[in-house]
């Protein structure tokens, strides 16, 4: 009874009506600073660990922990799902962007920009700029989704996305972000994030996250979606839809004065109900005229301080796995896969905090009508 009362109070205070899946009952969570054991690495901490790492890891997420293993070529890992483990393909030369298109300030440097501690609060001009960038990113992502078919290579998706972005007068934000060589990130099956498009053809039954960020008139719009290629089993389809639900439910609780930690709490609760796991090492971030900035948005249960304020723009981008959350980094220094080969899915939106809640800046409003 105490558990149900606490849950009811939380739902009331968060100003959102969350409908629990009919197949599962709410699970009571005690949010206290207690010792626990990480199932991924077997380490014992006195409280949830958050180790800021000032080195940025990619075009969409930052790495908040040093517990990312380097690929071990001598280690043989059997995948938990019915797919072949990914192997690096051939990466084609970097695509060019017309000189008249404005570039983000980090382009031209071999190192990613330093982590920006400032919180990005948009004025009226900034909100207009972010809406335009978000709308373009959503449109490009929807187009990329139409390309996901068996036999299509991720390199072909990158080329098409690149051309669409520059045709709109924008710059593909990942291109030239540190050493990232492509205009979009494509993360297939067990790839958690930062997959580099290459010569590998998509196969029937694959899942692929396409992560699109555009730089338009001085503002970044950042979004991603996990698409299903061909036909997948029902358990894989459910996994992808639950990950989508994690994002949508997290956005629904956002608003002025809400603690950022509530994002991770509700995502972790939903994942627990379905026996999925939440990746901890990569998080969301502030976004605006700066690609990545404070605050860091943790998608797992945490006790971090900090509240949302009107005008803030940031991403929410939960990454779930069907198995291990321990990431392993390939030798390309970008591609991150699950240690056990289990599937990973991710969804992402850029949101704006308004007086009445949150506005999704990267929401495609024409999907239903066009399909």
Image: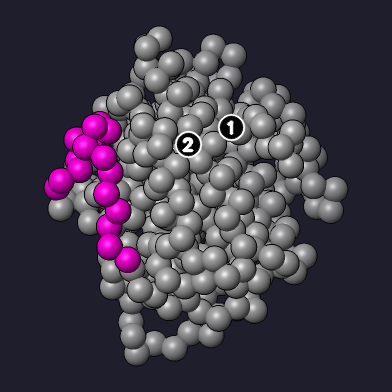
Q: Quadrant of residue 119?
A: top left
**Disc 2, SS:** helix
Residue at image coords 14%, 47% = 109
Q: Is residue 98 magenta?
A: yes
Residue at image coords 53%, 56% = 209
The residue most toward the left is 109
Against 355, residue 156 (above or below) is below
Q: In this figure, what is the number of numbered marks?
A: 2
Residue at image coords 19%, 41% = 106
Residue at image coords 64%, 47% = 244
* Residue labelled with disc 1: 363
Residue 322 in view, yes or no:
no
Magenta-highlighted residues: 92-109
Residue 137 numbered tag: 2
Q: Quadrant of the N terminus?
A: top right
10 Å crowding of disc 2: few (<14), some (14-19), many (20+): many
Q: Label 2 near label 1: C-beta < 8 Å?
A: no
Q: Is residue 358 magenta?
A: no
Give the color scheme: rainbow, by chain, secondary structure or one colour.
one colour
Q: Is residue 332 left or right of residue 4?
A: left
How would you classify the magenta stretch by its main secondary structure?
Answer: loop
The label nearer to you, 1 versus 2, is 2
Return the residue nearer the eye: 245 or 186: 186
Q: Is residue 97 left or right of residue 193?
A: left
Image location (x, y in percent) of residue 284: 43, 42
Image location (x, y in percent) of residue 102: 25, 31
Return the residue nearer the eye: 248 or 141: 141
């Amino acid at each position: 009874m105490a558990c149900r009362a606490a849950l009811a109070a939380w739902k009331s205070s968060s100003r959102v009506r969350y409908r629990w899946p009919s197949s599962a009952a709410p699970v009571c969570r005690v949010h206290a600073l207690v010792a626990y054991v990480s199932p991924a690495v077997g380490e014992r901490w006195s409280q949830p660990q958050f180790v800021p790492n000032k080195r940025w890891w990619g075009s969409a997420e930052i790495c908040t922990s040093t517990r990312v293993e380097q690929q071990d070529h001598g280690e043989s890992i059997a995948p938990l799902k019915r797919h072949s483990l990914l192997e690096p393909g051939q990466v084609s030369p970097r695509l060019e962007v017309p000189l008249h298109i404005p570039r983000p300030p980090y382009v031209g440097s071999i190192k990613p920009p330093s982590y920006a501690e400032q919180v990005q609060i948009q004025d009226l001009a900034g909100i207009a700029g972010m809406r335009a960038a978000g709308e373009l990113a959503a449109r490009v992502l929807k187009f990329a989704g139409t390309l996901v078919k068996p036999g299509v290579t991720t390199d072909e998706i990158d080329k098409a996305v690149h051309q669409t972005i520059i045709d709109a007068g924008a710059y593909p934000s990942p291109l030239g972000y540190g050493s990232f060589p492509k205009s979009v990130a494509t993360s297939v099956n067990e790839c958690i994030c930062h997959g580099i498009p290459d010569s590998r053809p998509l196969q029937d039954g694959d899942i692929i996250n396409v992560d699109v960020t555009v730089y338009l008139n001085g503002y970044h719009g950042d979004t991603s979606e996990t698409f299903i290629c061909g036909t997948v089993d029902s358990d894989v389809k459910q996994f992808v839809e639950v990950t989508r639900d994690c994002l949508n439910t997290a956005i629904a609780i956002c608003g002025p004065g809400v603690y950022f930690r509530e994002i991770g709490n509700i995502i972790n609760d939903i994942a627990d109900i379905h026996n999925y796991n939440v990746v901890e090492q990569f998080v969301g971030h502030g976004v605006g005229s700066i690609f990545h900035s404070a605050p860091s948005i943790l998608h797992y249960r945490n006790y971090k301080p900090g509240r949302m304020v009107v005008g803030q723009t940031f991403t929410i981008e939960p990454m779930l796995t069907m198995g291990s959350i321990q990431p392993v980094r390939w030798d390309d220094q970008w591609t991150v896969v699950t240690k056990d080969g289990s599937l990973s899915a991710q969804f992402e939106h850029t949101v704006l905090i308004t007086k009445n809640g949150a506005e999704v800046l990267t929401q495609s409003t024409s999907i239903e009508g066009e399909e």
